[in-house]
Structure formats: structure tokens, C-alpha cells
Image (tube, rainbow, N blue to C red):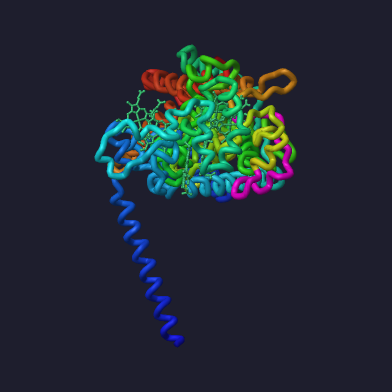
Amino acid sequence: MTELKFRRFTLNQRIQHIIFFTTFILLAYTGFPLKFPDELWAKWMIASVGGFDNRTLIHHFSGLLMIGVSVYHVVFHLIEKPRFDVLFNLQDISDFKQQMRYYLRLTDQHPKFGRYTWKQKFEYFGAGFGAVVMGFTGLLMWKPFEAMQYFPIGVVQIANLFHTWEAVLASLAVFIGHFYDEHFGKFPNISWITGNISAQEMRHEHTLEYEAAMKDQEPEEVTETSHGNNTGPVTMLAKLVFTVIFLAITVWMLWISYNVLVDAVTTYIF
Amino acid sequence: MYLRAGSIKIIALLFLAGMFLTGDALAQDRVVDASCFHCHTRQVTQFEKSVHFNNNISCTDCHGGDIRINGSVVSIDVMSKDFAGSPSRVNLTTFCSKCHEQVTRKYEKSIHWKKVQEGRPQAASCIDCHGTHNILSSKNQASPTHLENIPLMCGGCHENQTKMQAWYYGIKTDRFDTYKKSYHYKSYLGGGKVLATCSDCHENHDTKPEADPESAINPANLPTTCGKTNCHPGANNVYVYGGKIHEEQSVNLFFIDVKTLVTYFYIIMILFELAFTFGLIFLGITSGLDIKGRKNHD
């Protein structure tokens, strides 16, 4: 019996995702060293892209590309096929409450999700908000004197402030939250390449969507493979490597958050 | 005839060149200021590395007195004639103006000089920025006025709480800190070059306070200052207003300090994000541990 697969991402979406995350990583890689230029790792990272001018070039170019793909995403999805189940709704609140109750062992009933879980919606709109903030503030900072023809310089400085903060926030959300949920927890999750997810994942994560899709079908023979295909030596090695990278990035992000917080508190509050 | 004239010229040139070469060699062998050396060893050894020494200037050019090249007789008499000892703060510029007329005139327009004259010796004079006997060309990397060292040099006073606050009121001592956070210097820390240093914005010598209408940092003059060649060519027609260059100073909008507001907002956001992410990871793991014992797990 061939296993049933469900199409989750179109090719178009997968390409958007790849461009978005590549530019995101490049931006973080060339951006954070500038916030902490005294640190050894920062100097090393800047040297690794071939010096300061290259750093700037990569940052600007990736930024433009990210703005491009974000605009494309919005226009494409508004014009081509608007979906409304991606918006927040009341169901998300009760799903959230029930998930908390489930976590706290107050119920045995895990909430049943549709195509998008409340957490995925958070991540999606978080990324959208981040792209808008980073895009606009980034453009202002790139051309400060052009910006100053329309705004006071204070606006450029506030843009600078937003840019740092939002970078930290977005990187925390992506490098810790998103990585953990979608890539670490579901390792190896290659749906971002193939566009498909398995029937089993569909049943577990998107129960309502699964049920709706299978309504007219013959009830399938449910075979719980219990992630049996995830234990090959290659997969285990890959998972080990991924875990190490994930932990390293987590430590790095926590270091950055801590230092940005301390710096902000001492500068603007005390 | 023609040929002879030509060869005479060549011989003359060779002769001249020879004179230069030997002259150079002599200059290097010069037992410098031997008459001062015996008693002022420290000053002389410092001086021997300086740009002035390399330009054949000797102690007497500044201090006056009588230099005796052989220096075999050690005598305090050398500090005679028109000898001028250590200059006081107030007439220090007369030492330099002999040769650096223009620069000195410029410096004498600065706030630093004005304050020195008013009897506040902490303000910068030539020797605070350039050194005294060890003056180097600014192109020399070891010079305190070398592009990359200027922030530390100015910061030596303008970041120094005791120096700046002992006598003066209201002077900010965060100048280097704030400058360090600007892109102008970060590019250098990150391995690139210094994009603009203190004296690019404040002028080397006629440094003036912001309120002075002639100051390079007076808001009215900022377009020219920022618009210098190689800096921000488009700045000439831009009015820079509504914020300070040395950041961290607050930006107010209708009496609300926007920077502090943004900071509070994001501190809350980030703490929330951290609690949220790690809270869910923790809950997910702990509730997953006994998942087999539960009926309706996902």
C-alpha cells in the first residue's frame, strides 16, 4: 500500500519560503555582528564574508530581496487566491485554552486543528509584521539623507532602534520557536522541499482538515508507523548535527537578547 | 659648444645631488642637541623620534637658548640668551605659531583656547592633542591625531568624568560611548575603516560649541558639515533637525520620549517571546513524557 501524502505547499510557496529564509539567515549573519562589533565572533563573522564592505553589500542586497519576496507574497495571495482560514478566529482561542489544559493534564483531549494551528498563525503574522518593520526601517537607515528630506533625523534614529529590536525578536521567533516546532520536533521535516506531508502527520496536526478531506473517501486503514522511518543511522546523524547547530544558535540568540536588553535598560531607562 | 654646456649641467647636477646625499648623511649622524642631552635625556630621546626632529628642528627653535653642537662642555649656560623655559598654558601657542601660523590662528578661534584663556587649563591645547616632544605626523599610525586614534584622544578628556566634571558644569561625558555606537566607528571596529571621526565633524582646530553660529555642528551648518566631499553628497540641501547626532539623547514627540517608549514596548515583547517559546517547549516536553499513558494523545 503506497502511503497517502497531502500537498501542503505549492511550488510557488516553497520557492518563496526558500528565498525568505535564505535572506533571513544572511541578514542575521551580516546584521548582528554590527550590533556587537567589539566581540570576537562578530569580527570573525564579518571576516568570513570577506570584510566590512562585503558585509554591507550582502545585507543591503538580501534586504531588498526580502522586501521583494514579501511584496510578491502579499500581492500574489491577495490577487490569486485569498484564503481566510489563515486569519485568527475565535476557534484559535479555545484551541489555545484546550492545548494549555492538555499540557497541564487537565484534559486528555488534544485540540483538533484545521489547516493552520493558532501557533502557525502567530508565526505567520509575526514574520509578516517583522518583514514590514525591518523593510521600512531598513530603507530609512540605508539612505538617511534621502529620508531626512521628509522626516526629522529622530525618525531615522527611532528606525534604527526598531530595526535592532525587531531583529532580535524575529530571530528569537525563527531560530528558536520556528526551528523547534517545525524542524527539530518533526525532524526530518522536508515538506519545505517536497511540499507534502504524510497522512499520519496530517491526522495528528491538522485533524479537521484531514477529516474534511477524507469525508468522501473509503475509511483508510490506519497504520501507525510511529515514526519508524526516522531511526536510520543517516537520519540520526543528521539529527545530531542539527541539534548541535540548533543549540549553538539558541545560546547565541540568548546572549544577544540578554546584551541588547541590558544595553537598552542602561541607556534608555536608567 | 652645445655638448659642453650640457655636460657642465650634468656635472653640476651630480655635484648637487652629492651634496644632498652627504647632507642627508650628516643629518642622520647629527649628535642632536648634545648640549641639552646630558641634563634632559628624556626630552631628547622623545624628541629624536618626532616629526620636528626629522625636519631639522632643534630644542632652541622652541625654547631659545644657545645650542652647542659638540656638547663636550656640560654647562647650564646653554639655557641663556633668549631662553624660554616651559611655556605656561596661556602662552603655549606662541611656541608653535612661529612656524604653524595658520593652524594656530584657527585654534585660537576654538572653545578650547577660549577656555584656556579664561583660566581653565583642562581645555585642550596643542600639546594635549599632538604631544609635546614626541609630536608625530598624523599619517603616522602611532600619532594620537592619526584618524583611528582621534576618538581615543578626544575621548581621553571628553569621556573622562573627573577631568570634565571637576571644573565644568553640564558638559557631557558620554561622547566616545555614543560615538562608538554610531556606524561611523562601528565600521572600523568591524574591520573596515573609520568613516568619520570626531574632528571630521568638529574640525581639527576651530572646534566650537553647538550654540555658536559659526560652529561646524551648529544645526544651520550641519548640511555643509555632513555634505563634505566623500561623506554625504546629497546632504547639502537637507535640514537636519529633530534629533541629536550623538545618539542616546532622547527624541521627544509631544513630550513623550519615543526611544524609551519603544524600548519598553520591545522589552515586554522579547520577555513575552522568550517566556512563550520556552514555556511551550517545556510544557510540550513534560506533557509528552507520559504520552503513552494517556488515552487520546495526538
Along the horizontal axis of the image, is B49 left or right of B193? left
User: Which quarter of the picture shows residue B110?
Assistant: top right
Residue extending farthest to the bottom is B1
Residue A124 x %, y %: 58, 34
> Majority secondary structure of the magenta segment?
loop
* Above/below status of A201 relative to A2: above
Residue B240 colored in magenta in the image? yes
Residue B130 at what x, y percent from top left? 46, 36
Give the camera-side residue of B26 and A57. B26
**In the image shown, does B285 or A40 lie closer to the viewer?**
A40
Q: Residue at x 59, y 15 (%)?
A: B169
Instruction: Tell which of A256 and B200 is nearer to you.
Output: B200
Q: Where does the image place residue B33, in percent across and percent down from the top left?
A: 33, 41
**Is residue B29 a member of the stretch shown in magenta?**
no
User: Do we see residue A228 in this rendering?
Assistant: no
Residue B73: where, in percent of width, then height?
Answer: 26, 37
The image shows a total of numbered marks equal to 0
Residue at far left of view:
B72
* Magenta segment boundaries in residue numbering: B227-246
Residue depicted at x 56% and y 41% = B103
| Quadrant containing the N terminus of chain B in the rendered view | bottom left
The quarter of the picture where residue A235 lies is top left
**Residue B35 seen in the figure:** yes
